[in-house]
Image: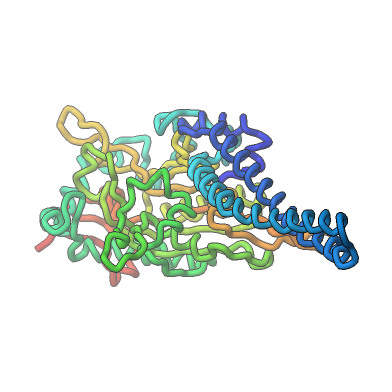
């Protein structure tokens, strides 16, 4: 949620911000409703002040009335009657005015929630590119491994034509898509045998790394949450069509609708909703591993097959809640990206960093960097009818400033130089640590061998009982 005071003072900043993000935003409509809200609130305050003043004004005439007679008495009685009637008149006006304010505030909130956070002019790695969609994203750098140069084809790197993750999974008995679809519909799967063990291994590896090496606090999170938490973290209203809804409100006994979360970020950020933290307890660094659900509404194409774009997956997430300081936010953004780069290096996966342009930032982000791994089984088909390889998104690191915390009413008590304190909204950041089974795609495809087996990276072997190679199923 943007700062409404700043919007009033700098409306053009938000007009340009919405334009650069290619998002509709009724800035003028919001300002008009906001003015109406404040006008009605002022009117109500004036009526309340008048009512309080009238209660004091009754005293002097009442005292004079005891001593008055004749015409003076009649005049005082008329004045008192008018003084007593006016509060009743005000009381009859207040409910209607209060209801008008409630309706205006609801209309203002509906418009307010749709105003996107303007993108930073300066991203982590240079000027933030302006673009209407992901086509405007810019590559920052590519990073290979000692055994794989992403500047060369797979065959040039390893001397044979690669299999896709779908072929490897079938040959090695790592998943069952047919039965998954039978049970739960399209984009469903069942990991089996070493497929499930490998899935657990990468999640545990990433989770332990965040806790043990980087000092993040381990947390569990609810994956079924109330609507206000989805709105508070910025996933509603814009992303509502991507969430699964449990319509408790339609039950005979009533209730509140609940939503399945698409990321552990929702629960981690909602943990401190409506709280005021002490400055010395910041930054808060939390990590979780949770099951995530996304409808993938509108997604189509070859991604419907395999593990790339699915409805249910597990993800290790990291979030940071820090002071309202831009440089501190930028420093954490850089560090959180660094944690991911270290992890991918340990898994021996080639990757690249991609600067998201304004049109690919979404409603809530001031800056976002995607991390993509090289996946030999993706991309356009060559003359031999086989994929030529392509980059596929595996991580996304976002800097949000106080956009989420304003919605969540998450603040901290800042200590000032004069010894006093001031309550301010925190800043927040988030970044995928690892999402599986998507990460299994590059893991299997990059580490496959000519005989169809897959070498397990040394970092994962302790989580698989020392297993070095996943061989053909028996």
Residue 57: x and y in percent read: 81, 58
The outermost residue toward the left is 474
Looking at the picture, the colour scheme in use is rainbow
Quadrant location of the C terminus in the rendered image: bottom left
Tell me: 117 left or right of 251. right
The residue lying toward the viewer, choosing from 453 and 170, is 170
- Taking the image as shown, residue 349 lies to the left or right of residue 440, namely right
**Residue 381 at x, y = what percent?**
20, 31
Q: Is residue 445 above or below residue 23?
A: below
Tell me what residue is drawn at x 15 percent, y 32 percent.
385
Residue occupying the point 34% across, 39% down = 391
Vertical side of 24 occupied by 251: above or below: below
Residue at image location 42% in from the left, 48% down from the top: 236
In this rendering, the count of numbered labels is 0
Residue 142: image quadrant is top left
Residue located farthest toward the bottom when viewing the structure as drawn: 465
User: Which of the two residues, 186 or 370, is positioned nearer the viewer here?
Assistant: 186
User: Image quadrant of residue 65?
Assistant: bottom right
Instruction: Tell me what residue is drawn at x 79 percent, y 58 percent.
Output: 77
Residue 59 seen in this snapshot: yes
x, y (%) of residue 275? 59, 65
- Measuring from the top left, give residue 164's x and y in whole percent: 20, 45
């Amino acid at each position: 949620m943007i700062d409404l005071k700043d919007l009033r003072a700098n409306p053009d900043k938000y007009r340009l911000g919405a334009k650069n993000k290619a998002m509709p935003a009724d800035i003028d409509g919001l300002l008009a409703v906001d003015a109406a809200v404040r006008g009605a609130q002022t009117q109500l305050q004036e009526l309340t002040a008048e009512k309080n003043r009238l209660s004091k004004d009754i005293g002097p005439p009442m005292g004079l009335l005891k001593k008055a007679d004749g015409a003076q008495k009649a005049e005082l009685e008329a004045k008192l009657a008018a003084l007593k009637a006016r509060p009743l008149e005000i009381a009859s006006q207040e409910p209607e005015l209060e209801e008008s304010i409630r309706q205006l505030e609801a209309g203002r909130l509906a418009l307010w929630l749709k105003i996107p956070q303007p993108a930073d002019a300066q991203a982590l790695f240079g000027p933030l590119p302006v673009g209407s969609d992901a086509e405007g994203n810019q590559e920052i750098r590519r990073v290979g491994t000692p055994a794989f140069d992403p500047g060369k084809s797979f065959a040039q790197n390893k001397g044979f034509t690669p299999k896709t993750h779908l072929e490897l999974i079938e040959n090695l008995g790592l998943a069952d898509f047919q039965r998954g679809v039978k049970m739960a519909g399209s984009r469903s799967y069942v990991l089996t045998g070493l497929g499930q063990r490998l899935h657990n291994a990468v999640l545990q590896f990433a989770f332990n790394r965040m806790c043990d090496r980087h000092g993040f606090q381990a947390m569990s999170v609810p994956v079924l949450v109330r609507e206000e938490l989805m709105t508070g973290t910025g996933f509603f209203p814009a992303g509502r069509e991507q969430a699964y809804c449990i319509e408790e409100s339609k039950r005979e006994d009533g209730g509140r609708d609940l939503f399945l979360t698409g990321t552990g970020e929702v629960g981690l950020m909602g943990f401190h909703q409506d709280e005021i933290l002490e400055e010395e307890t910041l930054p808060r660094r939390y990590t979780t591993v949770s099951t995530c659900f996304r409808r993938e509404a509108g997604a189509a194409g070859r991604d419907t097959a395999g593990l790339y774009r699915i409805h249910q997956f597990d993800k290790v997430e990291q979030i940071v809640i820090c002071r309202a300081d831009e440089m501190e936010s930028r420093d954490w953004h850089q560090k959180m990206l660094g944690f991911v780069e270290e992890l991918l290096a340990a898994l021996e996966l080639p990757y690249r960093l991609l600067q998201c342009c304004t049109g690919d930032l979404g409603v809530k982000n001031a800056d976002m960097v995607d991390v993509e791994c090289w996946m030999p089984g993706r991309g356009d088909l060559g003359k031999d009818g086989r994929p030529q390889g392509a980059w596929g998104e595996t991580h996304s690191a976002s800097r949000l400033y106080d956009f989420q915390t304003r919605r969540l009413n998450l603040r901290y008590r800042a200590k000032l130089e004069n010894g006093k304190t001031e309550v301010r909204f925190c800043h927040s950041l988030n970044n995928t640590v690892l999402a599986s089974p998507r990460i299994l795609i590059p893991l299997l495809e990059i580490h496959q061998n000519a005989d169809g087996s897959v070498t397990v990276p040394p970092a994962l072997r302790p989580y698989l009982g020392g297993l070095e190679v996943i061989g053909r199923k028996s």
